[in-house]
Amino acid sequence: AARLGGTPVALVTADLEAQLVALELPGLRRLRVIPTMPLPRAIEQVGNVAVVAHSEVGVVTLVDGASLRVTKVLRGFGEPRYAAAAHDGRHAYLSDSGTGEVVVLDVLAARVVGRVDVGGPARHIALDPSGQRVWTALGMKAEHVAIVDVRDPARPRLVRRFRPPWLA
């Protein structure tokens, strides 16, 4: 928002109240409360859309950054945890620890476009600097890491799993 002459806004989860709070930055003035499904846990910005994971209820909420309103609730997840934004501003890579998958979302079309089984409960997730691979830690102790090729968002492909010499 600041780059376009607007006011920067932060979205904060109020998970026990089933809402997001939009705060004006830097003063932290509350702009709006955004009601959501129960237990919003993690937020990732993808272009002008906020991707909100509700791991306990198996849904993902999409929030429009301009209007600060929910545009879509996506269902069909096990335990969606975290998201990583693609460089294109359109796609999000979501870890689903309940299904053991990395899920690709098209946030502009508001739908799932791809899934790949990573062989364990996918949790923390990051996109490499090239934008071609996603890394996700598997499990709470994360003894394994999975690497997924995401050059074609509709066809994510597991490249490999490995066990680092530390807990990831």
Image (tube, rainbow, N blue to C red):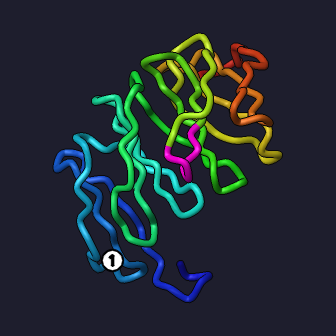
Using the rendered image of the protein, determine whether residue 168 is visible from the camera's viewpoint: no
The secondary structure making up most of the magenta span is: loop
Q: In the figure, residue 71 lies in which quadrant? A: bottom left
Classify mark 1: residues with Cα within 10 Å, few (<14), some (14-19) or many (20+): few
- Three-letter amino acid code of the residue under disc 1: Leu
Quadrant location of the C terminus? top right
**166 to 69, vertically: above or below:** above
User: Residue 34: x percent and y percent?
Assistant: 26, 61
Q: Please give left or right for residue 41 compared with residue 137 in the image.
A: left
Residue extending farthest front: 109
Residue extending farthest left: 17
Residue extending farthest bottom: 5
Q: How many marks?
A: 1
Q: Residue at x 25, y 40 (%)?
A: 39
User: Residue 45: x percent and y percent?
Assistant: 53, 56
Q: Residue at x 46, y 49 (%)?
A: 51
Residue sitting nearer the eye, 52 or 27? 52
On whether residue 47 falls in the magenta region, the answer is: no
Q: In the figure, residue 134 lies in which quadrant? A: top right
Secondary element at tag 1: loop
Q: Please give left or right for residue 135 compared with residue 119 in the image.
A: right
Q: Which residue is mark 1?
A: 28
User: Residue 79: x percent and y percent?
Assistant: 39, 25
User: Residue 111: x percent and y percent?
Assistant: 51, 39
Question: Which span is picked out in magenta?
Answer: 105-110
Q: Residue at x 77, y 34 (%)?
A: 152
Q: Residue at x 18, y 45 (%)?
A: 16
Residue extending farthest top: 119
